[in-house]
Amino acid sequence: MIFESHAHYDDSAFDGDRDALLDSLEENGIGYVINVGASLETTARTIALADRYPFVYGAAGVHPSDSGELTEDSLLWLKGQCAHPKIVAVGEIGLDYYWDKPAREIQKKWFGRQLRMANEVGLPVILHSREAARDTLDIVKAEYAGKAGGVIHCFSYTKETAEEYMAMGFYFGIGGVVTFQNGRKLKEVVEYIPIERILLETDSPYLAPVPYRGKRNSSLYLPLIAEEIARIKGLDYDKVVETTMRNAKRLFGIA
Ligand code: NI
């Protein structure tokens, strides 16, 4: 069975067939799904999905692009959601200088606050970091004691940055980009990171792997990602699936 460590099944892209798709996952070898919150509203929808599906777990958090909506009150609400038995992480949180909105100071403030919240509730973090390698590292080092660890999702940086996260005990979420023709930099990073540090993810509905690039993504395409990782690292497909399952269960504390 495959562990899907990052999907957004609350997204409207799944409004037409959400239940049918989720119902089909298990028979297609997908054993667990982390549905990741990206705003207050999608965190609430994540909890509804986790309540409905035994194999769906959730992460509570506000994405940097939506961090302008946070207030002291809503942060307190978010913290309360972390007590739900199926909320296993705080995320996705971080910095996004590609879209670059809201202002960087606002993104940084709420990233730091949500890291501290993760420390307080003792949950691991799911990081989103785009074109913000230095600032993300600095804030993680300053604000996150990191006892519960974390994963940097859709990793897009260099081997040197990977090394810094590895030293902090982080995992790396690897998804469809690893199958792209122009994914050379990521292929090199995947070759370098030990399989014991990798989690499989799709970021559905985004970032579908080749040959579905540009289409709606779903966890059903995870085997394409596992196959490419197996090829790059010269490992058996089953070894990739089993090891990434064990990694994810350890990080998210799922028995
Ligand atoms: Ni995401």
Image (spheres, rainbow, N blue to C red):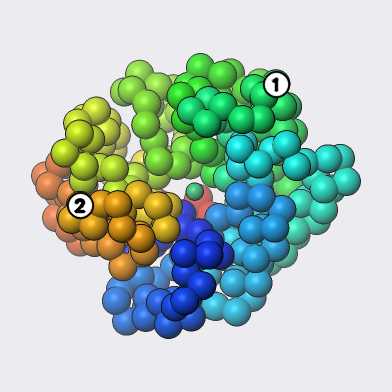
Q: Check residue 211 in the rendering and tell me which mark sits there, or answer none.
A: none
Q: Is residue 143 above or below residue 190?
A: above
- x and y, in percent, of residue 131 in the image: 46, 24
Q: Check residue 105 in the rendering and tell me which mark sits there, or answer none.
A: 1
Q: Which residue is found at the position 35% from the left and 60% from the top?
A: 217
- x and y, in percent, of residue 211 in the image: 18, 55
Dot 2: element = loop
The answer for how far apart the CA atoms under marks 1 and 2 are is 36 Å
Residue 97 in the figure: left or right of residue 210: right
Corner quadrant of residue 102: top right
Q: Earlier in the sequence, mark 1 or mark 2?
A: 1
Q: How crowded is mark 1: few (under 14 residues within 10 Å), some or many (20 or more)?
A: few
**Residue 178 visible at all:** yes
Q: Which residue is found at the position 72% from the left and 33% from the top?
A: 110
- x and y, in percent, of residue 148 in the image: 60, 43
Q: Is residue 233 above or below residue 159?
A: below
Residue 114 in the figure: left or right of residue 28: right
Q: How crowded is mark 2: few (under 14 residues within 10 Å), some or many (20 or more)?
A: some
**Residue 239 visible at all:** no
Q: Which residue is found at the position 47% from the left and 64% from the top?
A: 13
Q: Check residue 210 in the rendering and tell me which mark sits there, or answer none.
A: 2
**Residue lying farthest right?**
73
> How many numbered marks does the figure carry?
2
Q: Which residue is found at the position 25% from the left and 42% from the top?
A: 178
Residue 143 in the figure: left or right of residue 100: right
Dot 1: element = helix
- 236 vs 61, nearest the viewer: 61
- 172 vs 44, nearest the viewer: 44
